[in-house]
Image (cartoon, rainbow, N blue to C red):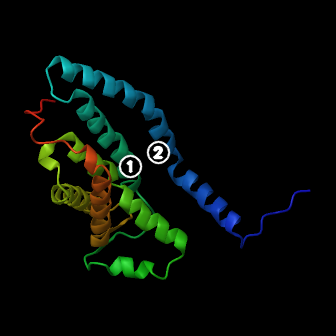
Amino acid sequence: MNHPVREDTFPYLIMVRVTRTWELWGGVIVAAVLAIPLSVAVISLLARRRARAGHPAPVRTALADVGIVTGTLPWLWMILTPSSGPTGIGLVPFGDLATLANAPWSVVLTQVGGNLLVFAALGALLPVRTPHLASAARVAAVAATASVTVEALQYGLRLGRFASIDDVLVNTLGAVLAALVTRRSWARRTADRAVSP
């Protein structure tokens, strides 16, 4: 005998959240999954081309280049998709994060977790790609610049999204944390010559 799921239970709330996520971002999810075989092919072609050109790290740089693109584009697609919300800008650091303190856990997870992941692939793989960016400070600078650009686009294009300095801070933190995870794989200055595309 089937029992209906009560609306105040944890499984129901998860089911609603998953359904809503699929409605909003199902296309992005499908595109990201379909991009996996294409990404593998591009990595292989890039690595071979670079090996023939005498590149010192053809596989590592090909993996990093494709990983940065495929790990970042779906997030950019999501946050630059027009929404029905109000357009605004928040320039007070930690102001928006403070308002999240009273929000439901699912909202906090979506907002903070999502923003931590936006430039995580970029942060994890830039220092693997090139020794010139093999430092947390340089990763932070690149991620902050990219995040400011995205927030400016959200505001300037009137996408129905709220541009916030807190999003920049959390995006940057996510990139730096991801960079620290890959620290053992960072490119070494002594091992790389000039990198050709």
- Seen from the viewer's position, the closer of residues 26 and 108 is 108
- Image location of residue 156, percent across then percent down: 26, 62
Relative vertical location of residue 124 with respect to residue 11 in this rendering, above or below: above
Residue drawn at (68%, 68%), measured in percent from left and top? 10
- Seen from the viewer's position, the closer of residues 186 and 145 is 186
Residue drawn at (57%, 52%), measured in percent from left and top? 23
Q: Quadrant of the N terminus?
A: bottom right
Relative vertical location of residue 193 with respect to residue 138 in this rendering, above or below: above
- Image location of residue 153, percent across then percent down: 26, 58
Q: Calculate the distance from the C-alpha at mark 2 to the C-alpha at mark 1.
A: 7 Å
- Image location of residue 124, percent across then percent down: 29, 49
Residue drawn at (26%, 50%), measured in percent from left and top? 183
- Indicate which disc, 2 or 1, sits on the residue closer to the N terminus: 2
Kind of residue sitting beneath label 1 = Trp
Question: In screen coordinates, is 73 left or right of 165?
Answer: right
- Report which residue position mark 2 lands on: 28
Q: Secondary structure at mark 1?
A: helix
- Image location of residue 74, percent across then percent down: 40, 46
Query: How would you rate the neighbour count of disc 2 (Cα within 10 Å): few for under 14, some for 14-19, many for 20 or more?
Result: some
Q: How many marks?
A: 2
Question: Can you name the residue that lies furthest to the right here?
Answer: 1
Asked whether disc 2 touches disc 1, contact meaning CB atoms under 8 Å apart, the reply is: yes
- Report which residue position mark 1 lands on: 77
Q: Secondary structure at mark 2?
A: helix
**Quarter location, residue 42:** top left
Kind of residue sitting beneath label 2 = Val
Q: Quadrant of the C terminus?
A: top left
